[in-house]
Image (cartoon, helix red, strand yellow):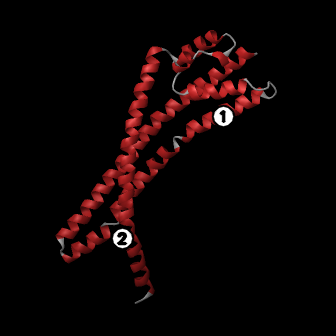
Amino acid sequence: MNLLTLLQGILSLLSSAMLYPVMVLLIIFFVWIVITMGGFVSEYVGRRKKTGKQDPKEFIESFIVSSHKNVQQLMPQKTQEMPFCFREYYEELVDELTKDKGGREVRVEYLLQSKEQEMTKSLDTFRLMVRAGPALGLMGTIIPMGPALSALSQGDLEKLSNNIMIAFTTTVVGLAIGTTAYFLSTVKNRWIHEDIKNLEYYTECIMRNKE
């Protein structure tokens, strides 16, 4: 056995061993996408309801007027009316405003940047799926082609059809994962940038109101 034959055998063995992990990952990612789609629809409905009741900019302005320079004592009912991204941030901001005035602006700016980073970090998984889905689908397509060509040369049609079926189905699932993740990431990215814009405006209004 020469070196080339040995290397080909090792690569063939490694390639065949990767087929099952690739198929398992595709199934896991597909289930994740389906679950994420459910959360996406729920968030979309919630945002539509909030936007239908009151525009975020109008809410911020009415919030500032109703607080009368005392955001720490805002009624709990009012906080429940806040848009989705404001509630947790409001509590953290109030905590910062109750502390010493020294370095307040720096602390609030750090809090705002931390919140923005936390919100954009949620897109990392979608970006991973956009690339990983089609990549795994391509691997699931190429890996069975070797055994399929071997089966074709031997006239084993059953083995050939099984490998071709695996190749096609993994391609479809991988592309479905990548396409869906790209759609979700695009819409989520727009939502996040809109939320960040509102948070910045909200923070600026609060800080001016406290001066």
User: With respect to residue 143, does 52 lie above or below?
Assistant: above
Furthest residue toward right? 102
Name the residue nearer the viewer: 99 or 153. 99
Under mark 1, the amino acid is: Gln
The amino acid at mark 2 is Ser
Give how far across and how far down residue 166 sits, in percent: 28, 61
Marked residue nearer the N-terminal end (2 or 1)? 2
Query: Percent x, y for residue 206?
Result: 68, 18
Residue under numbered circle 2: 16
Residue at the spot 29% in from the left edge and 71% down from the top edge: 147
Name the residue rendered at 36%, 58% in the picture: 24
Q: Which residue is painted at 40% across and 90% down in the image?
A: 1
Question: Do the numbered discs 2 and 1 sit on residues whose CB atoms are within 8 Å?
Answer: no
> Could you classify mark 1 by the number of other residues whose Cα lies within 10 Å: few (under 14), some (14-19), or many (20 or more)?
some
Q: Which residue is mark 1?
A: 113
Q: Nearer the viewer, mark 2 or mark 1?
A: 1
Judge by depth and name the residue closer to the eye, 39 or 51: 39
Decide if residue 4 is on the left or right side of residue 158.
right
Decide if residue 59 is on the left or right side of residue 49. Answer: right
> Could you give the CA–CA distance between mark 2 and mark 1, rounded to whole angstroms?
47 Å
In the rendered structure, the answer to whether residue 105 lies left or right of residue 41 reads right
